[in-house]
Amino acid sequence: MSHLDLLRTIQRVFRRAQLPMAYSQGFNPHPKISFSPALPVGVSSEAEYLDVELAEHMDESKIKLQLKGQAPAGMKFLEIVDIGFNRTALNAEINRANYQIRGLFKCNREDLDLCVQELLGQEELMVKKVTKKGIKEKNIRPGIFQLECKSDQKGLCLEMTLLTGSEGNVRPEHILELISNKCGLIIEEPLIKRTSLFIDNGQEQVSPLS
Amino acid sequence: MRQYIQNKLLPAVQKPARYLGDEWNAIKKPWDGAKVKMAFAFPDVYEVGMSHLGLHILYGLVNNQEEFLMERVFAPWVDLEERLREENISLFSLESYRPIKDFDVVGFTLQYEMSYTNILNMLDLADIPLRSKDRTEGDPLVIGGGPCAVNPEPLAPFFDCFLIGDSEEMLLEVLEAVSAWKDKEVDKEILLGQLALIQGVYVPDFYQISYNQDGTVSDINASDRNVPDRVRRRVIPDLDTAYFPVKPIVPHMEVVHDRIMLEVMRGCTRGCRFCQAGMIYRPVRERKQETLFQQAEELVKNTGHEEISLTSLSTADYSCVQPLVVSLLNKYQEQGINIALPSLRVDSFSVDLAKEVQRVRKSGLTLAPEAGSQRLRDVINKNVNEEDLISAVRGAFKAGWTNIKLYFMIGLPTETQDDLLEITRLAKDVLRLGRDELKLLGKGRPMITVSVSSFVPKPHTPFQFEPQDSRSLLKEKQEFLRENLKAKGLKYKWHNRNISFLEAVFAKGDRRVADTLETAWAKGCKFDSWDEHFSLALWEKAFDDTGLDPHFYANRNISYEEMLPWDHIDTGVSKKFLINEHRQALKHVLTKDCRWQDCTGCTICDRFDVANRLWGEVTIAAD
C-alpha cells in the first residue's frame, strides 16, 4: 500500500467510525489529517502516527470505541492522545526510524558483523538515488545512527536506526544495497519492518506521543 | 500459497495492492461450506474491474446465498504474469488465493471487445483449456455476461454459455442448476441442456451456423435441440425491489471510479441510433427516491467513501433527480461527502444540477453533443440543438467552470466535411463564449478539450447496417480536426483508430473470428485497449494466418435482408424497429423518447411484458 493509499484508507476508516473530521477551507476541502514520514511500499510497520483534527472535541476513549472494528485487516489503532492545536507537524518533528530486516541470509553471522563494523567505520557511504533529474549519489553515513546484527529464535536479523522526516530520509533498502555492494553479502526476499519512530531533540529521544 | 506469492512475487511487481485481497467488505466464505464456487473474472486490471458496478452487485448477491460463494480474479499486469509463468503458478483468486481451475464456475464479464484477448490469456494462466470442447467435467464451467454478450459469436467456442441481459435472477438459476448437476455426476452435456432452458441463457454449442459463398450467414440452426430458436434477453421488470449491494468492497488502492455507485435507474429510451446501451437495456426502470436515499445511507456508513455517484446511462433523466440530489446534499454536504453526476445531458437543466452538486468541489464539466452539425445530430437522433448547448455552456462558465470537455464522434453515417467543420466551429464558439464570460467574472481563461472518438457500428443498434469508415479516411478526418482545432485554450484528443477498427470487427464478428482471436492471443496480443500494448501488426498477421478479411466485418454495408450473426439473440428490440430507425436516420427524422411521448414500436414492452417504470412526476419537458 502506498502512502496515498494509506491516507485514503484512514479517511474512510474515520468516516465509517462516524468521527466528525475538520475540513480545510477553500476550493477543494479535505480532512485535516497529517502523517508521520511516509512508509515505503512493501515495508510493514508497528508504529505509525497521525494527527487528526476533529470538528468538535471528543474524549479519547469515545474515539477509540468508535474506531473499533472499522479498520481493514492488518491495521490497528493503538493509542489516541489529545495534543491540542499548536503542535509541530509530525513530519517535521519525527526524525528517527527503527527498522528490522529479516529474510534469507545467504551469509553467516561473523561475516555480517564484520561488514557492519566496516560500514560504520566509514565516514562516507555513497548510494545511488533516483530523482526526477536522473541518478544522484548521496552520502547516507550521517543518517545511520545505529546498525547491528542480531539473532534470536527466528534466526538472524538486522536492526538499525536511520534518519527520517523533513531533515532527510535514509531507506533500509540502502543498507541492504551497501551490505551487498561493499561486502558481497546477500539477504534474499528481505522482509522489512519499521519497529518505531521517535524524536531525537539533541538531548534525549522521545516518543511522538509524549 | 498466499504467503509465498505475497512475500516472494508481489514485492517485485508494480502496484502489488492489486493482488492483495483482504479489502474492506471483501467476503471470505469457508471453501468447504459452499456447494457451488464461482470466480468472477474481470478481463482487465484490478483498478478497472473494481470500478465496475456489475461486479459488486453479483459479488454481494451470490455471496448472500448460503450454498454459493463468489471470489474475484482480475487480469494480472504483464509483470506478474511473467512471474506466474516462470514459477508455474496457476492464476488465483483474491479471496482464498486458490487456483481458478478449482472453482465450479468461472464467469467473465464482457464489457468491451478489446478485452477478449485477456479472457484467453486468463484461461491459459489458469490452466483451463481455452475451447469448451477441450474441457472436461473436471474443468470449470466457463460463462460470460455483460453488454458484449448480445453478440457472443466471436467468443462462442471458448464459452460454455452466455447470460444475456440482467443477471440478478438468471445467475442464481444457473448456479442452482450447477448445484443440482453436481449431485448427479452426469455429463456436462446434460447440464448445458438444463442451462439452455433458463430464459436468457445461450449455449452456443447447440446452435449450428452456416455461411453463404459470400461469407454472410445463411442459417442459424438449433432445430435438433429442445432449445429456443431465439434466446430472449432476461429483464428484471422492477429495479426498485431488485437486489443492490450496500456493503461493496472498498479497495486499498485508488481505482478508476473510487466512489459509491448508486444505480438510480437502468435503461435509456432516448434512442440515440449509434448507442448500443440505449437499445439493449430497455425499458427504463427507475429506483424510488426513498430506496436510493436509504441505500446511500447504508453505503456511506459501510464504506466511508467521500463521494456518491448517481449512476445510470443518463442520470439527468431520472424523474426524481432534483429532489434526490437536494436531499443527499442536505444530509452529506457537511460531512464532506460529494455528490457526482457522471452523465449529463447537453442542456441547462443538467448544468443547473451540476452547479447544485458542486457546491462542495469543482472539477471539469463534460458535455457530449456527439456531432458538430444539427443535420448530423438529427441523423443520430441526439435530440440536442445548438441553443441547448450554448445555453448549457454559458451557464457553466457563469457558474465558474473554466474547463469544459466536449465529446464528439467522427465517421458517423452520412458525415461530410461540413459536419467536421461544424465541430471546429462549435468548439471555437464555445471557447470564445468562455473567454467573454470568464472575463466578466475576472476568472482567468477557459480550457476547452475536444475529445473525438471514431464511430464503431454496434450490433442491435439501428446503425448495425452501417460500415465503419476506413482507417485511411478516419486518419484524414483526425488530421483535419487536428489542423483546424489549433487555438490557445483548445485541446484536441482523439482515439486510436486502429483499436476502433478492431473493436468494429469484434463487435460485429461471427463465430469464425474466434480463430483469429486465438491466433492473435497466441502471437502475444493482450491488453489491446491499452495503447502501449496494442499491436496492429500482430493482429494483421493473425487475420492473414486465419484467412479472414477484417474489412468484411468492419467496413461493409449490410442489407436489411441479410441474416446477421447475432439475429438469434433477442434483446427485445425488434430488427424491424432497427431497420425503421435506420431509414428514419437517413431521412433526418427524429424519433422521440417513449418515456414522455408515444410508443416508438421497439416491441419490448409487449413481447417481454415489461414497461418503463418512472416514479417521479414527469415535470421535465424533454423536448
Image (tube, coloured by chain):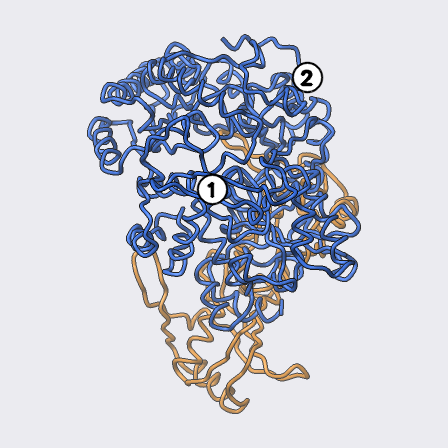
Q: Colour of chain A?
A: orange
**Quadrant where the N terminus of chain B is found in the figure:** bottom right
Residue B146 placement (x, y as % from top left): 56, 40
Q: Are marks 2 and 1 on the same chain?
A: yes
Secondary structure state at the residue bearing disc 1: loop
Q: Which mark is residue B112?
A: 1
Residue of label 2: B615
Query: Are the residues tagged 2 and 1 within 8 Å (C-beta)?
Result: no
Alpha-carbon distance for marks 2 and 1? 32 Å
- The residue marked by circle 2 belongs to what chain? B
| Colour blue belongs to chain | B
Quick one: which residue is furthest to the front in this view? B224
Name the side, left or right, on which B315 lies relative to B167. Answer: left
Residue occupying image coordinates x 66% and y 43%: B226
Q: Name the chain under label 1.
A: B
As drawn, B368 above or below B37: above
For the residues carrying marks 2 and 1, which lies nearer the camera in this image?
1
Between residue B553 and residue A96, name the one nearer to us.
B553
Where A154 falls versus A128 (above or below)?
A: below
Q: Is residue B443 left or right of residue B287?
A: left
Residue at position x 55%, y 57% in the image: B132
In the picture shown, does residue B288 fall above or below B263?
above
Classify 10 Å Cα crowding around label 2: few (below 14), some (14-19), many (20 and above).
some
Q: Is residue B541 above or below residue B422?
A: below
**Residue A7, percent across and down?**
57, 48
Quick one: SS at disc 2?
loop
Residue B177 in the figure: left or right of residue A137: right
Q: Which three-letter amino acid code belongs to the residue tagged 1?
A: Tyr
Residue B55, image x and y in percent?
61, 44
